[in-house]
Image (spheres, rainbow, N blue to C red):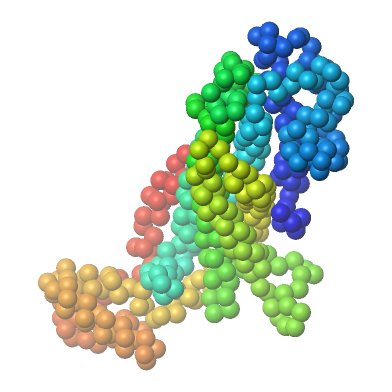
Amino acid sequence: MIDRYSRKELKDIWSEENKYKIWLEVEIAAAEAMEKYKIIPKGVASIVKRKGKIKVKRIHDIETKVKHDVIAFLTSITEQAGIKARYLHQGMTSSDVLDTSFNIQLLQSGKILIKDIDKILNVLKKQAKKYKMTPCIGRSHGIHAEPITFGLKLASFYEEFKRNRIRMIDAVENISTCAISGAVGTYANISPKIEVYVAKKLKLKPEPISTQIIPRDRHAHYFTTLGIIAGSIERVATEIRHLQRSEVYELQEFFSKDQKGSSAMPHKKNPILSENLTGLSRIVRSHVIPALENISLWHERDISHSSVERAIGPDANITLDFALVRLSNLLDKMIIYPKKMINNLNLTKGLVFSQEVMLELTKSGMSREKSYKLVQGHAKKSLANNINLIELLKKDKSITSIIEEKRISKIFSYEKHFKNVNYIFKRVFKS
């Protein structure tokens, strides 16, 4: 991923240096196990650990000749560690190293992504409670529906990211497997005890049954989870973009003192961060389909998945990390305009109470069909002529004859829409 959308912590995980470092840890752990079970001479692991250094350039130089990255890596380590390093990789296949190491990189990334989600949850919880009873209009299809509170809107995002946290924990758990099982997963030239030792040492679980590789449904699960989280990011970002539109302007992204919105128009304050998050979310989701397609490989293994994972491994994780951190900061610093929310609530002259009027008519004996048609007629007239709906209702004798004016006035109150806000908040924030 490009530096513009990368944070150092994730970049370091996906660096060549860290990749080879993990490869070396896998090889050393396997060597320790082989020494323990007297498969190779004592002292191999300690010599490799002491003398084997990661020299990225040297590995790449060797690979240009041998055209095999794991052989190039092992050759580089042997050059430094000496003759005893020939015992490395005994009975193993390249994928034992590659897959176990790739899973470790995903595990390392996933743990950071969980921390990123925790930050978003903390910000959303704080902001939801702050604006718990701040009235605003709820919209469906982009049209005014009925009153809600801004806190409820944020609580909805909070609950979604709680689910994302559970998904991410599950994906990390699912990907935390190790395979040291040999050429086609039969342990023909290596004991299963080596795999058990390596898995324990690296805090992984042995893959119950591998082929030459760890099955790619695990990876598809992981990357699909990233895609779902990206969808949640875009949901929040899209809401912010809509609410910052000039016609709405119920909130605004933080705009610093020296920030410029447009090269042409000095007045502009654009929702650039939420627009950027929308784009980054698309990038992360674009990696889901290739991950799903990687599940189906030829027989016990081919390498069609390899090139895919070299791209989506770093890109999806680094991009999502950046997006989550950006969203956290955006939510923490956004500027809310409660008065504008009230103004927008009142914009449609009471049309938002149409359902309650209809329900009151049905309670008083009128059929639902007739009630609907009657209220809809007045609603259309209110909208067309910019007249308060309550005025039209109070002039209609077919309505006032069955509903007292005092009861009609009581309907046009926001308070009843918020009577269960505390109940919802207790469900969402109970833990």
x%, y% of residue 210? 52, 30
Q: Can residue 338 be seen in this snapshot? A: yes
Screen quadrant of the N terminus: bottom right
Q: Kindly indicate the quadrant of the structure image that contains residue 403.
A: bottom left
Q: Is residue 196 visible?
A: no
295 relative to 56 in the view: left or right: left
Q: Is 117 on the left-hand or right-hand side of 139?
A: right
Residue 235 drawn above or below residue 245: above
195 relative to 175, above or below = above
Nearer the observer, 8 or 70:
70
Residue shown at 65% from the left, 9% from the top: 37
Of 419 and 373, the residue lying toward us: 373
Image quarter of residue 238: bottom right
Picture coordinates of residue 412, whole percent (x, y): 33, 73
Q: Quadrant of residue 370?
A: bottom left
| Foreground residue among 259 and 78 | 78
Above or below 227: residue 175: above
- Report the residue at 71% width, 18% height from top: 31
Residue found 81% across the figure and 30% down from its top:
75
Residue 241 falls left or right of residue 367: right
Residue at 76% in and 70% down:
259
